[in-house]
């Protein structure tokens, strides 16, 4: 009143400009039976137009501090991707638990394309305990793949590295890998007299590892190779 403060009220500054702005994100408060009460904070920074970064710092009453990061980049119209990770050393049992993922898409020269989707976990229960997304927290396995592809007219070539890990009980995970695999296929091409044909050829090197109970889990592995050639012919019949 007349230049003298009478009542102090909290206020919030909300940016309305369309550009990205660095700063603290809204904190999240939660509670669980395993970690107790939790407080999540995040800092967003975007010093350049082609990349930004979000740093997460979480506090769990029963497990201590967790640190996460999400880095996104678009250096050109031919390259973009993102990196995500999280790490926590639980105070209850000194167990180190983590999650890391990398997604990358790039248009290379002369018609080549590279695609990567890599997902790594310390253990499958990590997603259930610390993942905020319900869909991710109920996964029972992870898939990772790296592709190099190119097409020449009707022909399409793929070179790949793949890994699938299926989590069961402790020390009884199932790992399946394709290291490496190549595929060459064609679309339908006219062969003459109304007949069309094409082919699909693949060569793969597989690795498989699993556990057997005798009665304790014992790791067993197997490597094998496969070559497939699948020609196909179509003859459309018209009334």
Image (cartoon, helix red, strand yellow):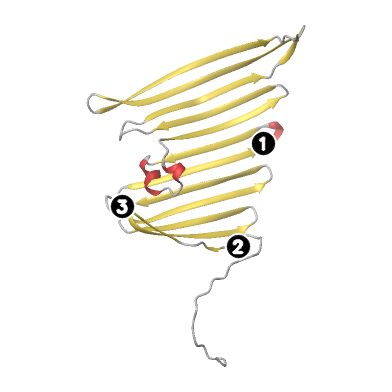
Residue 110 image position (x, y, % from top left): 71, 32
In which quarter of the view is residue 158 placed?
Answer: top right
> Residue at horizontal 38%, vertical 41%?
122
Relative horizontal placement of residue 155, taking residue 118 as reference (left or right) = right
**Measured Cα–Cα span from mark 3 to mark 1:** 49 Å
**Marks 1 and 3: in contact by CB < 8 Å?**
no
Residue 160 image offset from top left, x and y in percent: 55, 28
| Badge 2 vs badge 1, beta-carbon distance below 8 Å | no
Residue linked to disc 2:
21
Q: Residue at x 52, y 42 (%)?
A: 102
First in residue order: circle 2 vs circle 1: 2
User: Which of the two marks, 3 or 1, is nearer to us in this view?
Assistant: 3
Vertical placement of residue 131 versus 41, above or below: above
Q: Is residue 91 left or right of residue 80?
A: left
Which numbered disc flags the more N-terminal residue, 3 or 1? Answer: 3
Which sits earlier in the primary sequence, circle 3 or circle 2? Answer: 2
Which residue is the site of mark 1?
Answer: 108
Q: Which mark is residue 33?
A: 3
């Amino acid at each position: 009143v007349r230049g003298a403060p009478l009542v102090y009220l909290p206020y919030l500054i909300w940016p309305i400009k369309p550009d990205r702005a660095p700063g603290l994100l809204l904190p999240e408060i939660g509670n669980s039976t395993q970690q107790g009460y939790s407080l999540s904070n995040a800092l967003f920074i975007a010093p350049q137009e082609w990349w930004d970064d979000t740093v997460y710092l979480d506090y769990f009453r029963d497990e201590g501090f967790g640190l996460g990061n999400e880095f996104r980049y678009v250096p050109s119209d031919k390259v973009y991707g993102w990196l995500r990770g999280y790490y926590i050393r639980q105070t209850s049992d000194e167990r180190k638990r983590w999650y890391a993922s990398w997604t990358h898409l790039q248009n290379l020269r002369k018609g080549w394309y590279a695609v990567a989707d890599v997902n790594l976990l310390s253990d499958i229960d990590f997603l259930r305990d610390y993942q905020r997304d319900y869909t991710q927290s109920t996964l029972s396995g992870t898939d990772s793949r790296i592709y190099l592809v190119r097409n020449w007219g009707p022909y399409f070539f793929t070179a790949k590295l793949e890994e699938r890990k299926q989590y069961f009980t402790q020390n009884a995970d199932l790992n399946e890998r394709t290291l490496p695999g190549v595929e060459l296929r064609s679309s339908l091409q006219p062969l003459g007299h109304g007949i069309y044909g094409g082919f699909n050829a693949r060569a793969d090197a597989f690795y498989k590892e699993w556990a057997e109970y005798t009665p304790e889990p014992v790791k067993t592995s197997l490597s094998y190779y496969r070559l497939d050639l699948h020609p196909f012919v179509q003859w459309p019949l018209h009334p």
